[in-house]
Amino acid sequence: MPGTNLTREEAAGRAAALQVDSYLVELDVTTGERTFATRTTVRFATHEPGESTWIDFVGESVQRVSLNGIDLHPDEAFQDSRIALPDLGADNTLVVEATGRYTNSGEGLHRFVDPIDAEVYLYSQFEVADARRVFAVFEQPDLKASFTFVVTAPEHWTVVSTQPTPAPVPAGPGTATWTFPPTPRLSGYVTAVCAGPYDVVRDELVGRDRVVPLAIYTRKTLTEHLDAEELFDVTKIGLRYFEEQFDTAYPFEKYDQIFVPEFNAGAMENAGCVTITEAYVFRGTAPEATVERRALTVLHELAHMWFGDLVTMRWWDDLWLNESFAEWASSVCQAEATRWHEAWTTFQSHEKGWAYQQDQQSDTHPVYADMRDLHDIAVNFDGITYAKGGSVLKQLVAHVGRAAFTTGLIRYFRAHAFGNTTMADLFAQLEATSGRDLQDWAQRWLRTAGVNTLWIDLQTDADAVVTSATLRQSAIPAHPTLRPHRLGIGGYDLRDGRFGRTAYHEVDVDGPSTPLPHLVGTRRPDVLLPNDQDLSYAKIRLDPQSFDLATGHPEAFEDSLPRSLVTACLWELVQEGDLAPSDFLDYLVACVPVERQSTALRTILTTTKQIPSMLLSTVNWFTPPPQRAGARARVLPVIRAAADAAAPGSDAQLQLVTAYGWLMQGPEQAQCIRDVLAGHGPFPGLAVDQDLRWGLLCSLAVAGAATDADVEAELARDPSVAGHERALYARAAMPTAAAKDWAFRLVFDEDTQTNAAVEHLGQGFRRVLDAPALLTPYIERFHEAILPTFASRSYGIGERLVKYFYPRDLANAPLRDRSRRWLAEHPDAPSGLRRLIVEQLTFVETAVAAQQRDAAADSRG
């Protein structure tokens, strides 16, 4: 039985047999708090009259199925998430009347009740295959059709979809019906319905061929925090930029952005109706890195309007190209058209850090992944699909040239508008415009896994003149592919305390060694930096002289990108066991006071969803347990001094104070944080807004310096959904066995928590300072409970159970060994679950190896 799965072969067979014309989707969201009424009318043709097929639906029940005027028995037709459709005609009309279920997991039609005003808000999330949770649909991207949505809802609501919102028509006491115009031909997963008493701010853009209406929607209780002007500014910059670069007008009738609660991702590229996480409605001063990340997200979804919505992948094998393109295009736009001119430093320190981390796990996969079925797809929204793919596209641009790449894109959009494609269709255009055969390039870069390492071997004479220079390339045995690289080699000299670039050459390299004749006969620079400008996707190593000078003077780099490349080089050495964590900590301590590029600083100081903080990882997990208190004692004064010296109200001040809270370990630091919360802290100009208050209170909770009464008092100040979520975090973070047991039972023994609540509970649960015994019992409890619990929950919830309740912060050998045993004992566990466990295990294995490396170095004295 297929359950809710769908294989690539099944989808290909159905696509070969059918051509879908249109959907009429009628939803009534006034029927109750748990379910809604859904009626779908589908018109489609088949090339095989008399044969059978099926349409997909996941919901409470099906009341009626009518195919070409003949009623089918719903109990017989609807089985296992599919509705069987026998004896098809050449042209067919199908009507399905059913009852759908709201979710609290961010999948399908998510229902949220605002805890402040009790208003209800709905939003849809259909990628990968969750449109079928709302209406009957041929759930695959290559069966495009036109969609007409008709929504009956409370009359005081606003309803938003892919097409412009029509005037509502009264439908009964207190209700109304919105009938939207038909969409262009789209894949079902990029359609959308959002409904509720959303507030709206409107604007418009004069595009290349018409005026494009713009709108931003928020919940009423968040509207006061919406900085619509900046969001519209970024949106307009992106629309103008992409219309020019792609030489193709924005393809839809309007562009709405809806900020929605409890969202599983950063945003979703629904055509003309983008949904974005409410975390990007800042209730106070956000780190500049987060503001930049929000802008990047806005641009990412805008890029999808062309690459993903206008032209869509045929099957999910090409998910990488969909997401990788948006990653690359948004970063290019940000670097060239916005105020974030150091966007490539952001890309290097965050996106590439994520990619390198993912690509060195035992479960890594090629960028072009073999998506056999929906189960495979679920686990591939990862650092390979997004970040490595975007990095590889940046390398492809360097390989074929920017002009040829852009011209190929323009031809691609014109040839395939509102259609479906594969990677081969895009590469055919790029080969035509560049004159290059890309088959071997694509094979080595896209169909093989792993990351190469690059370094320069050189010899000099007594006068420091280079006599020989060779760029070396290596790969690990598990992934032995050596790749062609177009990369920059930079030379830097240290003068008056600053590194100035004195030379830069771009070269093509391939194989294990490539001569660098341009260096021979020149005086060697103080620092030679392979992959300068970060054009290629590869780890780098520095020659001994370059290593000593670059790591000894991180403050000397005038530009943030070369310093970020050096930092990444050292970070990789730590994770590979070639650099002691204590030595890396020396470097980080030197960087903290001088790093001003916001994302680079955040990568050092603060853990994000994608990548762990370098500093926190080094101190809390990579340093041997007996040395951790000493490591914190060494770092805390540096962070405090940097925070004291930071400009009042600056981004650096905000990030440093937050990191100080994360690392505090004694009453002196706790009192400092309490003073900040009381309004008389030692950091002038620091905006102590509600989000910062919660962050610092959670840190106090971890340190055992906050009580339930403190949490209740803060919740009284902030009874919003964000307040409730952070209160869960704070309570789960308290260093008591009762707090950890409460959090674990709440999500494993009950299925009542939303996706966002599970995430916040788990973040607090696994966070411990110097009390690892609190998590030790969960080595066994987690591994015993995860398989049956994962099987009983949606993927959105199950993923969070692993990511946030795996006791990763223990980072010790018993946890490592138990996870290895679990994997050996459960070879047939769902592939998605195994992948998630492997990701956590890889981090623990890396941490244990680093601890052993530092302990060995310490024992040698």
Image (spheres, helix red, strand yellow):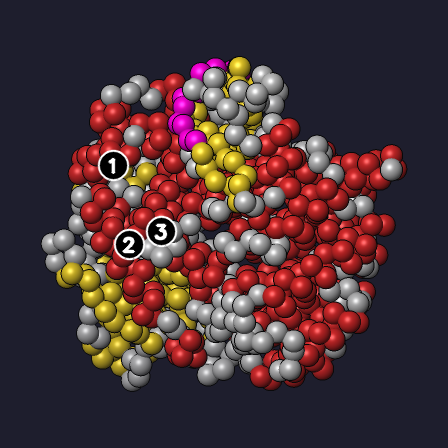
Residue that appears at 42% across and 50% down: 342
Residue 641 seen: yes
In the displayed structure, 153 sits above or below 713; it is: above
Residue located at (47% from left, 46% from top): 559
Q: Considering the numbered disc 2 on the image, is that residue within a helix, a strand or a loop?
A: helix
Residue placed most toward the observer, 110 or 609: 609
Question: Vertical placement of 295 versus 9: above or below?
Answer: below
- Three-letter amino acid code at disc 3? Gln
Asked which quadrant contains residue 433, the reply is: top left
The residues tagged by marks 1 and 2 sit, at their Cα atoms, a distance apart of 16 Å
The percent position of residue 792, horizontal first and vertical second, equals 60, 53
Q: Which mark is residue 406?
A: 1
Highlighted range, magenta: 503-517
Mark found first going from the N terminus, 2 or 3:
2
How far across and how far down the image is residue 517, in percent? 44, 16
Q: In the picture provided, is 584 more to the left or to the right than 47?
A: right
- Asked if residue 144 can be seen in this view, the reply is no
Q: Which mark is residue 238?
A: 2
Disc 2 to disc 3: CB gap under 8 Å: no
